[in-house]
Every structure is written in structure tokens, then in C-alpha cells.
């Protein structure tokens, strides 16, 4: 059973590449960002707590996130359902909690896959990124969104995430560097890290990832 962590800066294409792996290996994708956005849309207690942090590009607390993940991973394990974590862990304490919860479940992570993209490219991509209201697919419009453009996957309306606006992007990048980048060294030390070059077209990058999985016999 595959248990995968995807690492990469905001805008690295983690979510989109997770969708490729999800189809290929019959996995479920758990995007903690999508999960929190759904809670905000429902105006739940969790959504209310998360909203102000998210809109500023700050992280939601480790305690809240770890609590959510503990239930969800146990549930996947009980069902024998392989999974991809997109957006979790985001801090070293979250990574420690993840490895400890997997340990308690008697299993280990298949790999932590880093999609490596230079920072200037991330900022460029995020500031041109539009997201589908319905299916969360994203599309980049570096020269501005054309009038009337809709989601190519499902025809849903496109919007610019509050945290994809310019001022927030810079804050998200610094939050990423401070809190999440250290995870690269963390997983490397544990010999759990794999890296692919995240510069190129969507197809080039998914090709690299699928080749790596075949080579490392991850399935
Ligand atoms: P994302 O869609 O992964 O870019 O996440 C959007 C926002 O959700 C982040 O900027 C955080 O505010 C929040 N978030 C998502 N996952 C986590 C996490 N694992 N820990 C803390 N905050 C998170």
C-alpha cells in the first residue's frame, strides 16, 4: 500500500501531480488546503478557526492539523486504502507526528517526494494561478485570465484564491522557507526523500515522477 508525502513550495504543482499519481495507483489524495477551504465554505468551527490564518498565508496550528490527520490516516489504514498527503506535513513537528502515528499503525511512509522548483518560478506561477470553484483544478494565466475562461476539467467558474494575491504570496513563501523547507533535510536524514526537478511542462514533470516510482519500485 502506498503512503506518500508530497513536498514542494506553494505553486510547485504538488496538487496537480498528486492527481496523476492518484489515478495511476488508485490512491486517495488528501489535500489539507482543500479540506480547510471546504470547512471554511461550511462555516464550521474548524473553518472559522482556520480562515484568518489562511487568508494571511499563515499556518493553521500543528495541534489542529495533527488531530485531523490522525483520524484520517487511521481510517485509510483500516480500509487498506493507499494515500497521498498534499500539504501535510508542513512543519517538522507535523512530520514527527506523522511518522509516530504511522509507527503506531505498524507501517511506514513509502516516500516523501519533493517537487523541486526555484523560488522565482513559484512566485511567477502563483500570481497567475486561477482555481476552479467546483473541482479545485488550477490553471496559469501569466498574461491575465481571458474573458469568460472556465475550468477545462469540469466547466466550473475560475477564481483567484485569496492567498494567491501578490502580498500574501510573498508571506506564504517566507512561511514555506521558515517552516516547511526544513522538512527536506528532515526526510533526507531519514532516507525517505526522493526529488524530481519541478521545472518544465506538466507532462515532463509527471513523466519524471512516474519513471522514479517505477525505478524505485514504489507501488
Ligand atoms: P494549500 O492549499 O496547501 O496551499 O494550503 C492553503 C493554506 O491552508 C496554507 O497556507 C495554510 O494556511 C493552510 N494549511 C494547509 N495545510 C496545512 C498544514 N499541514 N499545516 C498548517 N496549515 C495548513
Image (cartoon, grey):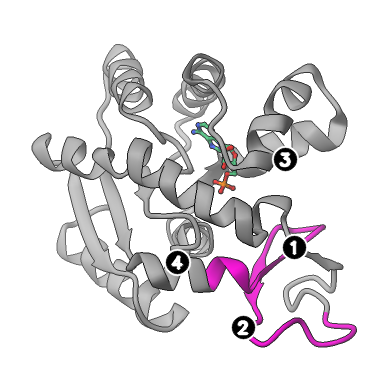
The nearer-to-camera label among 2 and 3 is 2
Q: Residues at badges 2 and 1 in contact (C-beta under 8 Å)?
A: no
Q: Which residue is mark 2?
A: 142
Q: Which residue is mark 1?
A: 160
Disc 3 residue: CB within 8 Å of ligand 1: yes
Real-space Cα separation, disc 1 to disc 3, in angstroms = 13 Å
All told, the count of numbered labels is 4
Real-space Cα separation, disc 4 to disc 1, in angstroms = 16 Å
Q: Give me the disc on residue 108.
A: none
Real-space Cα separation, disc 4 to disc 2, in angstroms = 12 Å
Residue 146 magenta:
yes
Q: Residues within 10 Å of mark 4 (few under 14, many from 20)?
A: some
Magenta: main secondary structure equals loop
Real-space Cα separation, disc 4 to disc 3, in angstroms = 21 Å
In the rendered structure, the answer to whether residue 174 lies left or right of residue 214 reads: right
Residue 79 drawn at (x, y percent)? 51, 28
* Element class at badge 1: loop
In this view, 133 is above or below 171: below
N-terminal label among 4 and 3: 3
Q: Which residue is mark 3?
A: 37
Is residue 174 or residue 149 the one in the foreground? 174
Q: Which residue is mark 4?
A: 122
N-terminal label among 1 and 3: 3
Magenta-colored span = 125-149
In this view, 31 is above or below 53: below
Quarter holding ligand 1: top right
Q: Residues at badges 2 and 3 in contact (C-beta under 8 Å)?
A: no
Amino acid at each position: 500500500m502506498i503512503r506518500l508525502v508530497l513536498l514542494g513550495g506553494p505553486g510547485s504543482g504538488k496538487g496537480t501531480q498528486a492527481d496523476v499519481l492518484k489515478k495511476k495507483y488508485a490512491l486517495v489524495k488528501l489535500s489539507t488546503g482543500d479540506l480547510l477551504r471546504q470547512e471554511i465554505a461550511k462555516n464550521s468551527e474548524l473553518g472559522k478557526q482556520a480562515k484568518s490564518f489562511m487568508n494571511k498565508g499563515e499556518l493553521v496550528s500543528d495541534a489542529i492539523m495533527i488531530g485531523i490527520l490522525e483520524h484520517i490516516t487511521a481510517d485509510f489504514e483500516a480500509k487498506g486504502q493507499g494515500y497521498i498527503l498534499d500539504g501535510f506535513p508542513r512543519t517538522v513537528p507535523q512530520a514527527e507526528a506523522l511518522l509516530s502515528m504511522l509507527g503506531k499503525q505498524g507501517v511506514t511512509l513509502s516516500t516523501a517526494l519533493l517537487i523541486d522548483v526555484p523560488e522565482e518560478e513559484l512566485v511567477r506561477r502563483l500570481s497567475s494561478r486561477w482555481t476552479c470553484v467546483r473541482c479545485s483544478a488550477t490553471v496559469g494565466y501569466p498574461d491575465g485570465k481571458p474573458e469568460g475562461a472556465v475550468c477545462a476539467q469540469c466547466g466550473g467558474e475560475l477564481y483567484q484564491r485569496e492567498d494567491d494575491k501578490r502580498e500574501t504570496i510573498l508571506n506564504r513563501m517566507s512561511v514555506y522557507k521558515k517552516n516547511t523547507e526544513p522538512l527536506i533535510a528532515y526526510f533526507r536524514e531519514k532516507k525517505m526523500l526522493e526529488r524530481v526537478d519541478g521545472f518544465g511542462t506538466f507532462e515532463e514533470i509527471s513523466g519524471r515522477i512516474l519513471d522514479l516510482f517505477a525505478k524505485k519500485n514504489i507501488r
